[in-house]
Image (cartoon, rainbow, N blue to C red):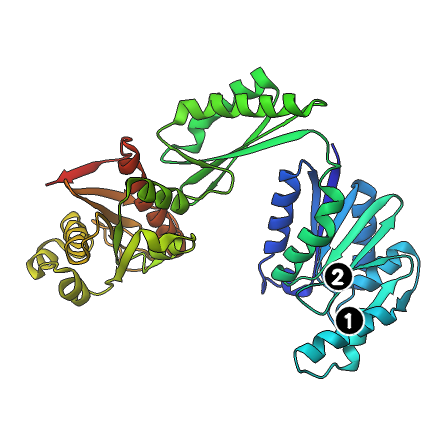
Amino acid sequence: MNTCAILSIGNELLLGHTLDTNAAFLCQQMTTLGWRVCGMATVGDDLPKIIDAITRAAASADVVLMTGGLGPTPDDLTRDGIAGALGVGLSEHADLVEAIQARFTRMKRVMTDSNLRQALLPDGATALKNECGTAPGVRAVLNGTRLFSMPGVPSEMKEMFALRILPEIENVAGNTAMRRMHYCGASESSFSEPIRAAEKEFGAEIGTTVDDMIITVRVRASDPDKQKADAICLAASEQIRQQFLDSWFSDDDATMASTVIDLLKKNGKTLALAESCTGGLIASALIDVPGASDVLIESAVTYSNAAKIRRLGVREETLDKYGAVSKQTAAEMARGVLQTTGADYSLAATGIAGPGGGTEEKPVGTVWLALGTPSGVYCNLRHFLADRRGNRVRAVNTALDLLRRHLSGQPFTGDVEHIG
């Protein structure tokens, strides 16, 4: 199997000021294409260390993908690093100067002398056209290993990868098939034996990851015969999926939110939201999906008790007797938004995200969820054990899973109480 190494360059990454989403994106892309990512490294703006990192990566992989360090400032040293690893100099290219100048002209800005650094290339290397920015990428070869350097700006990197690099590498990774299956409501440990059995029976490579209640099972199979690799991957995937049908909700790039929207569209139904502790995150997850406006009518963020009373019709006596974080309040929130919007379904979330606000009776992470339906309200108590962000995101995924299960005719997980 062909191998790939990924190198991220920039002090901002080592200082923790910038999250390295580029490396995650490239790993996903290369793995999907059938390449094996054999290593990842992050290096700061230090020329000797960049040269060493490039040399090491090239010695261990067939392709090295680099991001960052192509800007116009003195600390942008990736071009110099590639030249150093190759043992060559840097030369200015008139066509790159012209292209950079033309971009500044289109932006009605004046190009400074520092931008001329972006027209430098290691001798023997070629430029990768940048459709979205001023910094060209770099393609070079070191002892048979292909080096590709892209800008650190994610939008520029993704565009350059898709247009300039992908066409060269997508058909050389060998006969590998991959599938990702997403589950919610099952424990990660429950997959251990089914995965072990599938690996033994089919010889596939299978792994899992967990992210805020969502378990992703990755199945990869390789064979000289591409059709056989596809068949192995499908058989191993299906054997696992059949054991967790209630919890499975999508494959590959589909999300919990896109699955719920598809189910609402399929059933010709609409949805309204009443959010307290999630603060609009349920709506945000849904609105991230194109076409959400076909099914999502409204989201009311009712964070205070006064807002719950005014907007949703939650009774003051309910709040006084049971508190904002209670089954009774969640149910009235779901009913209230259902009645005032005329939606077919509603979801409500009220809880204690933390880090403060918890009590012995209602510790941090306590969340009541409610699903409003034509036949009544279903309430579900959850106790999440994460930080503030994690508790909120887990509430989002669990709430959407409640609706998914109802629309699919599948059983709920946890203790779900039906209130007429």
Q: How many marks?
A: 2
Residue 87 sits in which quadrant?
A: bottom right
Q: Residue at x 31, y 44 (%)?
A: 264
179 displayed left or right of 139? left
At 73% across and 64% down in the image, what residue appears? Answer: 69
Q: Which residue is mark 1?
A: 99
Query: Going by the picture, which residue comes out furthest to the top?
Result: 201
- The residue under label 2 is which amino acid type? Lys
Quadrant placement of the N terminus: top right
Say whether disc 2 or disc 1 marks the residue closer to the N-terminus: 1
What is the crowding at mark 2: few (fewer than 14 residues within 10 Å), some, or many (at least 20)? some
Label at residue 164: none
Residue 94 spot, x, y in % from top left: 87, 72
Looking at the rendering, which quadrant does residue 418 occupy?
top left
- Local packing at callout 1 (Cα closer than 10 Å; few below 14, some 14-19, many 20+) is some
Relative vertical location of residue 131 with respect to residue 223 in this rendering, above or below: below
Mark 1: secondary structure: helix
Instruction: For the residues labelled 2 and 1, say whether their Cβ atoms are less than 8 Å apart.
Output: yes
The residue identified by callout 2 is 129
Is residue 33 rendered to the left or right of residue 114? Answer: left
Q: Amino acid at mark 1?
A: Ala
Q: Image height check: is 64 above or below 73?
A: above
At x 29%, y 34%, the residue is: 413
Q: Secondary structure at mark 2?
A: loop
Instruction: Look at the image and tell me whether residue 246 can be seen.
Output: yes
Disc 2 from disc 1: Cα separation: 9 Å
Looking at the picture, how far across and down is residue 180, in whole percent? 52, 35
